[in-house]
Amino acid sequence: MPVPILKQGPFLIASVQAAPTDIDLLALRDELLERAGRARPLGVVLDLTVLDVMDSFATRTLQATAEMLRLRGVRSVVVGIQPGVALAMVQLGLTLAHVPTALNLDEGIELLEDSLGLGDHGGE
Amino acid sequence: MVDRGKAVSDGYAHETQKRNRRRACRWRTAPDLTDELVTHFRELREQLRAKWLDMMTAKGLLEGLSPEEAETESATIYDTCVDCLESGEFAAAERYADRMAKRGVLRGISHDQIMGGMLTLRDVYGRSLFERYLDDPPRLGDALDVYEPVANQILLIVALAFIGERERLVREQQEAIRELSTPVLRVRERLLILPIIGMIDWQRALQITEQLLRAIREHRAKVIVIDIAGVPTVDSKVGNHLVQTVDAARLLGATAILTGVSPEIAQTIVTLGIDLSKLTTTGDLQGGIDQADRLLGYRVVGE
């Protein structure tokens, strides 16, 4: 099942559905990379709220996707990891290193806006 | 989270009960004698029960029970035991014992009172058999062969019920203590403090992490200050668990600051090679809160 990607202002929001297959995740990566070139978003939010499990393949793929997007000038943030999923992930040593994270969609967008110096949050 | 203690003790009690049920069916091979004994105990009900109550009073086993309670309970117990002898089934005794255990443990009636009471009843029943079959030793032997397994089975049921109930209560209290001993405090908007006091074992460490992650989500915290000034020692398991907690918090968008690391723990951590390089640390809690404020003010981007 393909991951729906919505546009919100200058950002893209990818809402990963429950139990994505390896193919779904690779397709997501390709789709985001392609749109990064076409629509030139300023940032991408990868929303994992609906997931109740994250395996090593999903973690590696998301990490790679974020890094590839960064090389194309697009920042990303992962949001919505559930407490139980977070616990299971770190116990397996999956830490999503180098990928910014936030609690939920609102926080994620705020994080992106701050990092880009947008909005009235003060920034760095 | 699996409570291993509970699973083991439940399993043990269950297996013992199954074994006892299999053993207890042997006396049904002498049904006539069994009926004779049942009739005997029922006929002498009031005498034996009164004797039992007198003996318990003399030993001080009825403390904490009103005269009415002593009357009703002793009657029920006496009748239940005779019913078990008659039917060969112990389900009624088990149910009664469980009920007694829950009430008894709650009201602080001691083990000695319960076991003392049941052992006294056992003696009273037994003595009555001795008196009855005084002139017929072989018959006495047969009667005891019928009576003793039943009496022992009942005693075992009562003992297990009380032990089981106490263990359940202790587990509940331990759980409550664990929860209370690691509060997660919301100090400011987006800032949580987790003061850890006392020794941490793997179970407590896991519970702390779960509590913390739930709190991060509930309060939308961006910074958590973990203060371990109250922790005497840390081993490599706990150290690694700390790292996992910090990583898990980050996955929920929160940064962790570690404070209150004593000289001993600092030495242990480095000697054991626990990698806490990802953790921001400050000497004391005040420093940690100041650092947190800075982080919240700037809204740090990236990892």
Image (tube, rainbow, N blue to C red):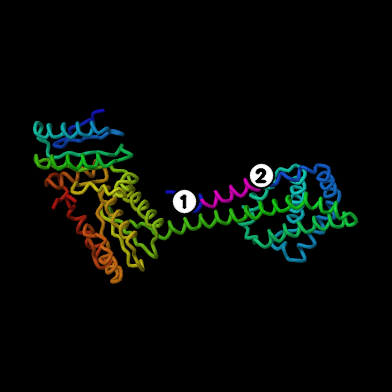
- Looking at this rendering, what residue extends furthest in the right direction? B135
Q: Is residue A10 above or below residue B168?
A: above
Residue at horizontal 19 percent and vertical 59 percent from the top: B294
Q: Chain letter for mark 1, please.
A: B
Q: Earlier in the sequence, mark 1 or mark 2?
A: 1
Q: Which residue is mark 2?
A: B22
Q: Which residue is painted at 82% across and 55% down in the image? A: B48
Give the foreground label among 1 and 2: 2
Residue B27 in the image, given as x and y percentages of width and height: 76, 45
The residue type indicated by label 2 comes to Arg
Q: Is residue B259 left or right of residue B161?
A: left
Residue nearest the viewer, comparing B24 with A72: B24
Residue B202 vs A84, above or below: the answer is: below
Residue drawn 34% across the image and 62% down it: B195
Task: Characterize the local packing of mark 1: few (<14), some (14-19) or many (20 or more) Cα atoms within 10 angstroms.
Answer: few
Question: What is the magenta range?
Answer: B8-22
Dominant SS of magenta comes to helix
Q: Where residue A79 sits: x, y (%)? A: 25, 42
Q: Find residue B260 and name its label.
A: none
Q: CA distance from mark 1 to mark 2?
A: 29 Å
Count neighbours of disc 2 (C-alpha within 10 A) and say few if under 14, some if 14 to 19, many if 20 or more. Answer: few
Kindly state the secondary structure of the residue where label 2 is placed. Answer: helix
From the top left corner, tell me how far across and down residue B116 is, in percent: 71, 61
Residue marked by disc 1:
B3
Q: Can you say whether B128 is above or below B268 in the image?
A: above
